[in-house]
């Protein structure tokens, strides 16, 4: 009786076994890449908003401080989204008839609030507090990116846990003097690591990797 | 699962066993003493056999195939659900910013919760306008900063989706305008007749504004009548004071000055308008720091085992109807007559102890004891010179009488057809009225019936009009505390379902029917405080108390009761005792899941009530736990399950009111049996002539007493004050504490904060306030009766009850048990995914999003404090979600959870301190259980700070760790319980 399988089947089966390892490896890699991709994380994505509000114009162009609108960033977990009143402080005088601002005037007239879409959205099992990050010298720009150059706000970072941990494990790489937190053009004087180490000591930044710092 | 409890208990053998026991022997249940198979099962398995299977009935004849199908589906769903993208979230800012609101930071507002009309002052936490949590108001005399179970559970009542949401007329949705049209017609007819056919029925109230409205309405309709009915009111107290002083008098006590306290069937530590204050004062005089300190002594005479009885140094279980006889003999003994009867020695010793503490003792009659007992107690207190020192009298705080007499008269008038318009505000008389009044039947004879209530309840169903009532957190009102102190109640939120307060409802009967609650309350006070009103009003709202409104103490001396010469002989036969329930009170909280699932203090019964009997009666009638019986009393019958309560008086049956509701809502309807169906208006609280007939079959009771057993070992430590003085180190004797280096784990130095907790078991009264506070703070779900039967209750903090000694009158010890935050935690090392870890500050952390639900940690926890979400219990209705604490993650199915030491409060305090460049101060962090505790038994803080209160307590020689011999090094430790028995009685 002749052989059922041809001799070349040996090579074929070796290839298959060898290939399986590659395929599994590829799948693992692909899963990891997909999970980190902006498709999943939303990194770099801007969201449609009720008003085409441009941070580039207000922050970059006019130089308005972050805290003019985000008033509670130094006192609360939530940085605060400005009430319609804040918009109307200026826009009752300038661009008062602009069609772009019709929703703002509508809101002011009717008392119906504007509904903004959240751009930086952490999962609900994570507790993030703006006030303590600002206090410890984490610049707005560090997480939110070059806001002064964003016509429409987009998500500047992946907001994944490994991204948080880059700083929570090595804060010296990111912290800046408190006076520079709201400065969008900040560049460290000299070596960031040297400045950072000094600030970490000075600001008593420690114990950032306990789970219950964020998860509770 | 429940069938395991069906083994018969041999009470005789248990008795024999207990008598043979030497030394201190603690036990938890009769099943444990009998070592039944059911108990062994609970002991060795965290959940009963097959608990992981689908509950029967839901999957039919489930079997393996069904199980695999469900598992496959849930695996697929669980896997897929992790792949979904986060839903888009909206941010909705204000149009005009609201004053003082910082998004993300809660505000606290002072208000008060009235129960039976009497206020407990509160500070309510509000997140962006949503009240989520209740704390005590330290300025309020009834709260002193602490709370009880009812106040803690009240936010859940606010967010209850079962509350009525629309005005209805004959079951159809109506409107306020329609009602007013109908009402104005009737009222104009009534006006012509001076209101002769108008009756208004309300709850008991202390509100000055309501009193003003009552006067206004009665001036408009002079022939109308205003009736008050409170199912668990102060009728007996007032009747007793009328017998003693000739006028109704309000009495309260100052336990701070009392060395000896006698409770005559009084549960003053738990129920009552000053319960929180009494618990604080009692604990202040009870905790000892050092062997030289003195301690108060508590005697309790009672039928059913209450927490006051459990804290007593001497408890005398007698039938409720015999209490009067004991009070009488005591009164005579104080006059020098030697007492007689079976308890002569006890009474004589008590009399001597009281005599030795003249002016520093107090006799407290039970709110629901007979008027005669109240009168005798007044006499004894007068005789002992306690009045003005430990006992204070004032004029009554409530407006008018709310006892059964008024309701009886009203029903007679209804029967006679004299009532043409009946407005009922807040009360649910169809359910709560004594059975002999036939309220429901007579109600139907009234031509126009209008009912205001929180729920479409039993009474609403029989009324023409139903109006949704606003919750106390939604309405303007005012109320007095036990001593008369007024609180102006302010709403935390607009009425969710457009409800109206009782003030707004009753305004419809006045000349200004459209006034808002705010205008009514403010208007009332503006008339009385014309000068500087705005300042006064703001201060009153801010503080939550109106200064100087406590009623002045009244000099009242009791006259000799006429009946002193002829003591009423205690009637023969089985006795029935009615009491408000420690969880659902008179039934008004029946739809509150937190309270339904709250294990009652002594017998740990949840989701229902039982006929409580003593072991002797059980033996005589051959009754077993969970046996169904029919209770026959004065020609009426109810069916109830039996529960044998160790220490319950024999020949007496206690039934708790508040269950067997038919229209309470989805949570409370059909739970337990209705004890009101036996209750009569002539003897609302007790009576003899009860007959028990055993029925075939059993009724499973969801009792948590056997769950989470810590099997033997040195868990509870207690001693008498004498023993402690002789041997201050008793709590550590016979316990082997292994040296710290005897561990496989590398040592760790906690060089910053080190969080720890100390719980003083001498102070703890077992009142459960901490358990509900934990529920509220940490978004803990409710699992339902079926879940509790399977041991799946989710309480992060439970109160373990241990009995000691004789079956007919055991001592009882309470031990709040929560995550011990072991430094060498056995749970952490077995977690395959590092979901439970240890923080550098010594917290045993639980990271929900890592947990995959292996339950290894729970299996390895010697304290049995970890809880598992078997289902998605947190699948709440939209409106309920608004009441969640936004600072705590809501857990989903398949996730383990447990006490976190309120880590959200720790983090909040840490951030606050860091923002101010300082360290966290002692007292900055108070856990939810700690703030709720009336007795201040729980202290939390930094054990690295030698001056913190918790460090001081941990240095005390009474301090010990539970199961410390396992070298888990628990961060939660306990101070052993001390009792102060009278040596004279002890010897006898």
Image (cartoon, rainbow, N blue to C red):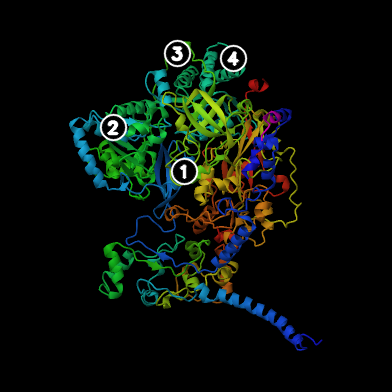
- The chain letter for the residue carrying disc 2 is B
Upstream in sequence: badge 2 or badge 4: 2
Marks 2 and 4: same chain?
yes
- The chain letter for the residue carrying disc 1 is B
Q: Secondary structure at mark 2?
A: strand
Report x, y in % for residue B736: 75, 43
**Mark linked to residue B563:** 3
Identify the residue at the far front of this view: A1
How many angstroms separate mark 1 from mark 3 (CA)?
A: 44 Å
Report x, y in % for residue A3: 79, 86
Q: Quadrant of residue B307?
A: top right
Is residue A38 in sight in this rendering?
yes
Upstream in sequence: badge 3 or badge 2: 2
**Mark linked to residue B199:** 2
How many angstroms separate mark 1 from mark 2 (CA)?
A: 30 Å
Find disc 4 in the rendering and name its residue: B341
> Badge 3: how crowded within 10 Å, few (<14), some, or many (20+)?
few
Q: Is residue B9 magenta?
A: yes
**Horizontal side of residue B518 vs B264, given as left or right:** left
Identify the residue shown where x is 51% and y is 67%: A137
Q: Quadrant of residue B423?
A: top left
Find disc 1 in the rendering and name its residue: B668
How many angstroms separate mark 3 from mark 2 (CA)?
A: 36 Å
Residue A85 versus residue B948: which sits nearer the camera?
A85
Marks 3 and 4: same chain?
yes
Marks 1 and 4: same chain?
yes
Q: Is residue B211 magenta?
A: no
């Amino acid at each position: 009786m002749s052989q059922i399988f041809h001799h070349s089947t040996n090579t074929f089966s070796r290839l298959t076994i060898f290939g399986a390892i590659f395929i599994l490896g590829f799948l693992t890699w692909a899963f990891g890449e997909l999970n980190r991709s902006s498709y999943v994380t939303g990194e770099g994505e801007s969201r449609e908003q009720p008003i085409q509000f441009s941070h580039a114009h207000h922050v970059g162009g006019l130089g308005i401080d972050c805290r003019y609108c985000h008033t509670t960033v130094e006192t609360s977990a939530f940085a605060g989204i400005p009430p319609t009143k804040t918009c109307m402080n200026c826009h009752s005088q300038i661009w008062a008839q602009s069609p772009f601002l019709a929703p703002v005037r509508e809101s002011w007239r009717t008392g119906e609030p504007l509904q903004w879409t959240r751009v930086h959205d952490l999962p609900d099992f994570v507790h993030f507090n703006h006030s303590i990050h600002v206090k410890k010298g984490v610049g707005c720009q560090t997480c939110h990116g070059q806001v002064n150059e964003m016509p429409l706000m987009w998500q500047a970072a992946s907001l994944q846990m490994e991204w948080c941990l880059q700083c929570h494990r090595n804060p010296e790489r990111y912290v800046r003097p408190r006076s520079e937190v709201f400065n969008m053009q900040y560049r460290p004087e000299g070596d960031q690591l040297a400045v950072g180490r000094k600030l970490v000591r000075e600001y008593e930044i420690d114990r950032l990797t306990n789970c219950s710092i964020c998860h509770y | 699962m429940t069938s395991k409890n069906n083994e018969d208990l041999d009470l005789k053998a248990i008795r024999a066993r207990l008598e043979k026991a030497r030394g201190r022997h603690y036990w938890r249940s009769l099943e444990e003493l009998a070592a039944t198979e059911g108990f062994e099962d609970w002991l060795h398995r965290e959940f009963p056999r097959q608990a992981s299977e689908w509950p029967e009935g839901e999957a039919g004849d489930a079997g393996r195939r069904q199980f695999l199908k469900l598992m496959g589906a849930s695996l697929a769903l669980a896997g897929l659900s992790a792949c979904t993208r986060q839903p888009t979230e909206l941010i909705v800012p204000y149009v005009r910013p609201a004053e003082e609101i910082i998004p993300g930071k809660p505000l606290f507002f002072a208000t008060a919760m009235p129960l039976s009309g009497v206020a407990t002052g509160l500070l309510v936490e509000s997140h962006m306008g949503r009240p989520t949590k209740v704390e005590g108001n330290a300025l309020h005399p009834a709260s002193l900063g602490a709370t009880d179970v009812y106040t803690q559970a009240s936010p859940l009542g606010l967010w209850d989706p079962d509350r009525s949401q629309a005005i209805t007329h004959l079951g159809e949705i109506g409107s306020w305008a329609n009602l007013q049209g109908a009402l104005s017609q009737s009222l104009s007819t009534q006006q012509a007749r001076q209101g002769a056919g108008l009756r208004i029925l309300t709850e008991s109230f202390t509100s000055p504004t309501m009193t003003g409205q009552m006067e206004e309405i009665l001036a408009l309709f002079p022939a109308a009548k205003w009736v008050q009915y409170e199912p668990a009111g102060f009728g007996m107290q007032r009747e007793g004071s009328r017998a003693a002083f000739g006028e109704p008098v309000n009495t309260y006590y100052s336990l701070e000055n009392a060395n000896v306290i006698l409770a005559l069937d009084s549960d003053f530590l738990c129920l009552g308008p000053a319960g929180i204050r009494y618990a604080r004062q009692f604990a202040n005089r009870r905790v000892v720091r050092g062997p030289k300190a003195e301690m108060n002594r508590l005697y309790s005479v009672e039928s059913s085992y209450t927490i006051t009885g459990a804290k007593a140094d001497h408890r005398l279980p007698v039938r409720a109807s015999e209490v009067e006889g004991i009070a009488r003999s005591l009164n005579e003994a104080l006059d020098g007559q030697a007492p007689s009867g079976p308890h002569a020695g006890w009474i004589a010793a008590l009399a001597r102890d009281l005599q030795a503490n003249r002016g520093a003792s107090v006799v407290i009659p039970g709110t629901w004891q007979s008027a005669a007992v109240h009168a005798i107690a007044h006499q004894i207190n007068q005789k002992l010179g306690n009045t003005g020192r430990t006992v204070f009298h004032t004029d009554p705080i409530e407006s008018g009488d709310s006892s059964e007499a008024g309701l009886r008269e009203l029903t007679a008038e209804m029967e006679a057809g004299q009532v043409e318009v009946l407005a009922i505000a807040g009360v649910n008389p169809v359910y709560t009225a004594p059975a002999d009044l036939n309220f429901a039947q007579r109600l139907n004879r009234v031509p126009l019936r209008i009912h205001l209530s929180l729920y479409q309840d039993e009474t609403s169903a029989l009324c023409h009009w139903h109006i949704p009532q606003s919750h106390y957190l939604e309405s303007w009102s005012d109320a007095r505390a036990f001593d008369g102190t007024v609180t102006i109640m302010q709403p935390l939120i607009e009425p969710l379902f457009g409800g109206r307060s009782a003030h707004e409802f009753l305004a419809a009967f006045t000349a200004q029917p459209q006034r808002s609650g705010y205008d009514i309350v403010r208007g009332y006070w503006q008339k009385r405080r014309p000068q500087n009103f705005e300042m006064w009003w703001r201060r009153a709202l801010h503080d939550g108390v109106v200064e100087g409104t406590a009623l002045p103490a009244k000099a009242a001396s009791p006259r000799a009761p006429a009946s002193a010469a002829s003591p009423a002989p205690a009637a023969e036969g089985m006795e029935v005792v009615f009491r408000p329930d420690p969880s659902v009170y008179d039934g008004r909280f029946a739809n509150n899941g937190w309270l339904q699932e709250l294990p009652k203090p002594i017998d740990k019964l949840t989701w229902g009530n039982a006929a409580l009997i003593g072991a002797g009666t059980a033996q005589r009638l051959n009754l077993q736990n969970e046996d169904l019986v029919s209770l026959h009393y004065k020609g009426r019958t109810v069916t109830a399950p039996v529960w044998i309560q160790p220490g319950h008086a024999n020949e007496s049956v206690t039934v708790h009111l508040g269950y067997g509701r038919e229209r309470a809502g989805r949570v409370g309807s059909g739970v337990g049996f209705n004890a009101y169906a036996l209750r009569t208006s002539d003897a609302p609280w007790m009576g003899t002539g009860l007959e028990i007939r055993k029925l075939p079959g059993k009724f499973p009771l969801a009792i948590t007493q056997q769950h989470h057993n810590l099997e033997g070992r040195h868990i509870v430590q207690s001693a008498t004050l004498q023993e402690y003085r002789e041997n201050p180190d008793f709590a550590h004797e016979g316990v082997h504490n292994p040296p710290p280096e005897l561990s496989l784990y590398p040592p760790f130095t906690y060089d910053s904060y080190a969080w720890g907790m100390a719980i003083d078991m001498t102070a703890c009264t077992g009142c459960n306030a901490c358990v509900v506070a934990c529920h509220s703070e940490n978004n803990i779900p409710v699992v339902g009766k079926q879940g509790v039967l399977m041991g799946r209750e989710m309480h992060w903090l439970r109160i373990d009850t241990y009995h000691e000694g004789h079956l007919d009158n055991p001592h009882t010890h309470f031990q709040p048990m929560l995550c011990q935050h072991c430094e060498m935690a056995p749970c952490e090392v077995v977690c395959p995914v590092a979901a439970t870890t240890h923080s550098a500050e010594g917290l045993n952390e639980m990271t929900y999003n890592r947990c995959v639900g292996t339950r290894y940690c729970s299996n390895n926890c010697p304290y049995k404090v970890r809880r598992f979400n078997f289902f998605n219990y947190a699948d709440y209705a939209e409106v309920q979600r608004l009441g969640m604490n936004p600072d705590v993650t809501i857990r989903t199915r398949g996730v383990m959870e447990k006490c976190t030491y309120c880590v959200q409060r720790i983090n909040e305090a840490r951030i606050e301190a860091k923002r101010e460049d300082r360290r966290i101060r002692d007292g900055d962090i108070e856990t939810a259980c700690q703030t709720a505790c009336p007795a201040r038994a729980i202290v939390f803080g930094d054990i690295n700070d030698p001056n913190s209160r918790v460090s001081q307590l941990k240095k005390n020689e009474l301090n010990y760790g539970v199961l410390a011999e396992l070298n888990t090094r628990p961060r939660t430790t306990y101070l052993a319980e001390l009792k102060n028995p009278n040596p004279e009685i002890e010897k006898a």
